[in-house]
Image: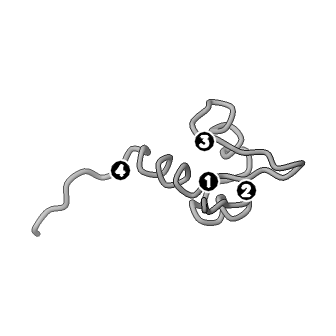
Amino acid sequence: MTRLLTVAEFKDRYKISHSAFYREVAANRIPIKKIGRATRIALADAEAWASSLPTQGGKASDG
């Protein structure tokens, strides 16, 4: 069975603001599922979105 996150769970897990979440949804980068009036995000889709984000900093140095 697919694990679904609420919008609040998604925002808390990935430390993203409400407006940024809906910008990502509008840009079709976060697929959502509507169940009645409830909005849910599949955990697999959430993880795929997070892994697609650019990383900051670059390579770690040895010292």
Q: CA distance from mark 3 to mark 4?
A: 21 Å
For residue 30, which numbered disc appears in the image?
3
The residue labelled by disc 4 is: 56
Q: CA distance from mark 2 to mark 1?
A: 11 Å
What is the quadrant of residue 63 in the picture?
A: bottom left
Q: Which mark, by number, is residue 7?
A: 2
Q: Pick the residue in front: 1 or 39.
A: 1
Element carrying mark 1: strand
Cα–Cα span, label 1 and label 4: 26 Å
Amino acid on which disc 3 is placed: Ile
The answer to whether marks 1 and 4 mark residues whose Cβ atoms lie closer than 8 Å is no
Residue drawn where x is 60% and y is 42% of the image: 30
Which residue shows up at 35% across the image and 50% down it? 56
Q: Residue at x 30, y 52 (%)?
A: 57
Q: Nearer the viewer, residue 32 or 22?
A: 32
Query: Residue lying farthest front?
Result: 1
